[in-house]
Image (spheres, coloured by chain):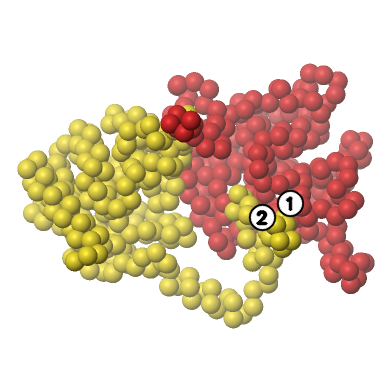
């Protein structure tokens, strides 16, 4: 459940009515989470609360977006909410995987919070296993989108203008019967569940995902966040080419030593 | 992903998902088995004192054998402290019972109260509390406490190989202490703070998260060590904490502590010697 940061002095929860909720799915390469880190870090968003839940593995650490000695000692936990009222943007960052059998209760709690906080729409950043693409998906852009019917009415036209590709449905029984098509997002974590639940509950949700594999997923995060920026225009791209705004995203200070410590000098 | 022999292998994902299992529908038998396992994994907190909620001003939690042994050597004794609670739990790694007569090498989770000031509570948790049990532990322990004016101190250990640093961990002098504190904690910490990108997991992280979210002043002292078992050098690495306001007032006589430490050395040696 959402717990605001400053509970003292009678201050109520922040008003999120009409805001866009941006969040990641814990998925292959952790691309959604890395992209969210870039958004929070670049827009210098303020932490407004915690999403306290028994569904995620606990973890703590000092401020991952610290820029100086003074702001480096704020404690961060596994699920936190940041906001930027000037852009009517609220971001949920998830920093650890789900505890076994807890992903369904998490989705329920999350969607009920979306409804009670009256967010206008949800944008879910996710990824899917690159090795499960079919022949057609191997060509062209690795980026896809999905819109729930309620959001399709509002922004479907914009996606067409941007020339974005909708996530293809795949045959439910490949080889046997190619007419029954289903949505399949391998490696996407709770993406499919959140999307299908939002469709049936009338929540406006967009899913933006990238096909990728495990490895150094920082470039994938940049590609995904630029994709998001094409639509939401969170930062201005310097050049006319709107896909080339990589240099304007600020890498958080916590993205260090991702692949291990320094080497012992005696090794050489 | 194909291996050398042409077999297709599912690539492990850092995202920590088990999709095969999630896609499968749960049969009534599966549901029954899952419920039974959940029931077996439920933890029980048994308090010996009748008065609940416990009024608590200071709560010291030692997680892991070495942290628990530090409290046994430098703080606890049978004269000033009384046992008031025990946690009964089971998971794949360990099982605890409701007995309060334990050895330092056993798995146990006991609660003590200072007789002179019953609002000072201490917990030694040398058993492993699994992921799905950590939240329960928090709710059942903190749920029994009146939290107004509460301050929490957590002691724990973890392998130095987990410590992320620019230099190699081989050149680091271990064991060493690092601290993390909640927003409300205003006192001096006894060692440097834990720098990013380092994080803390498991029960210590669960307790500190709880305190941060609910605005309880709390500090965690994490000892990075290269010894896995009970070890006096690791235990002594917590000594800087004895200079803190809280522990200074609770510390035992130094000679008494040395005697107990020597006993730990011999106990663990006997247990690890397979030639006797």
Q: Furthest-bottom residue in view?
A: B29
Q: Contact, CB < 8 Å: mark 1 with mark 2?
A: yes
Say whether residue A102 is left or right of residue B2.
left
Separation (CA) of disc 1 from disc 2: 9 Å
Q: Which residue is mark 1?
A: A129
Q: Residue A253's image quarter? A: top right
Say whether residue A23 is left or right of residue B127.
right
Say whether residue A211 is left or right of residue B66.
right
Task: Note the chain letter of the red one.
Answer: A
Task: Name the element at disc 2.
Answer: loop
Q: Quick one: quadrant of the N terminus of chain B?
A: bottom right
Residue A211 in view of the camera: yes
Give chain B's shade: yellow
Q: Which residue is mark 2?
A: B11
Task: Name the element at disc 1.
Answer: strand
Residue A51 in view of the camera: no
Quick one: A156 or A227, which is closer to the camera? A227
Single out the mark in the foreground, 1 or 2.
2
Q: Position of residue B90 (x, y in %)?
A: 38, 68
Instruction: Mark 1: give few (<14), some (14-19) or many (20+) Cα within 10 Å.
Output: many
Q: Quick one: quadrant of the C terminus of chain B?
A: bottom left
């Amino acid at each position: 459940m959402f717990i605001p940061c400053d509970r003292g002095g009678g201050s109520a929860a922040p008003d999120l009515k009409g805001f866009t909720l941006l969040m990641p799915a814990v998925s292959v390469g952790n691309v959604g989470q890395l992209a969210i880190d870039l958004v929070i870090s670049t827009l210098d968003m303020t932490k407004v609360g915690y999403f306290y839940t028994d569904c995620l593995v606990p973890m703590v650490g000092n401020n991952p977006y610290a820029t100086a000695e003074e702001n480096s000692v704020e404690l961060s936990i596994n699920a936190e909410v940041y906001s930027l009222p000037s852009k009517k943007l609220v971001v949920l960052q998830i920093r650890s995987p789900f505890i076994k059998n807890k992903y369904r209760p998490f989705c329920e709690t999350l969607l009920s919070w979306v409804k009670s906080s009256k967010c206008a729409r949800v944008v879910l950043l996710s990824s899917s296993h690159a090795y499960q693409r079919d022949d057609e998906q191997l060509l062209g852009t690795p980026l896809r989108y999905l819109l729930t019917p309620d959001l399709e009415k509002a922004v479907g036209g914009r996606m067409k203008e941007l020339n974005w590709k909708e996530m293809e449905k795949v045959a439910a029984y490949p080889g046997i019967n190619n007419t029954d098509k289903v949505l399949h997002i391998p490696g996407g974590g709770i993406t499919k569940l959140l999307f299908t639940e939002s469709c049936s509950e009338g929540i406006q949700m967009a899913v933006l995902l990238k096909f990728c594999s495990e490895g150094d997923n920082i470039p994938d995060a940049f590609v995904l966040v630029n994709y998001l920026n094409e639509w939401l225009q969170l930062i201005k791209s310097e050049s006319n080419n709107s896909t080339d705004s990589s240099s304007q995203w600020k890498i958080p200070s916590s993205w260090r030593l991702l692949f291990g410590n320094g080497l012992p000098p005696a090794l050489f | 992903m194909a291996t050398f022999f042409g077999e297709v292998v599912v690539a492990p994902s850092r995202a920590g998902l088990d999709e095969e299992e999630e896609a499968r529908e749960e049969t009534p038998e599966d549901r029954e088995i899952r419920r039974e396992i959940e029931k077996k994994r439920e933890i029980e907190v048994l308090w010996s004192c009748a008065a609940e909620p416990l009024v608590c001003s200071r709560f010291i939690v030692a997680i892991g054998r070495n942290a628990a042994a530090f409290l046994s050597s430098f703080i606890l004794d049978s004269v000033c402290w009384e046992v008031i609670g025990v946690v009964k739990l089971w998971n794949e790694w360990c099982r605890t019972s409701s007995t309060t007569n334990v050895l330092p090498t056993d798995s146990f989770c006991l609660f003590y109260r200072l007789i002179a000031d019953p609002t000072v509570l201490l917990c030694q948790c040398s058993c492993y509390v699994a992921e799905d049990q950590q939240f329960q532990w928090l709710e059942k322990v903190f749920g029994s406490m009146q939290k107004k004016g509460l301050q929490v101190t957590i002691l724990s250990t973890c392998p130095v190989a987990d410590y992320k640093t620019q230099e190699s961990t081989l050149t680091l002098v271990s064991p060493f202490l690092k601290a993390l504190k909640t927003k409300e904690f205003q006192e001096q910490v006894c060692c440097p703070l834990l720098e990013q990108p380092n994080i803390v997991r498991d029960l210590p992280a669960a307790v500190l998260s709880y305190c941060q979210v609910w605005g309880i002043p709390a500090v965690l002292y994490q000892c990075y060590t290269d010894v896995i078992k009970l070890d006096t050098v690791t235990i002594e690495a917590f000594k800087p904490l004895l200079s803190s306001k809280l522990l200074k007032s609770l510390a035992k006589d130094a000679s008494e502590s040395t005697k107990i430490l020597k006993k730990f050395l011999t106990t663990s040696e006997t247990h690890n010697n397979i030639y006797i």
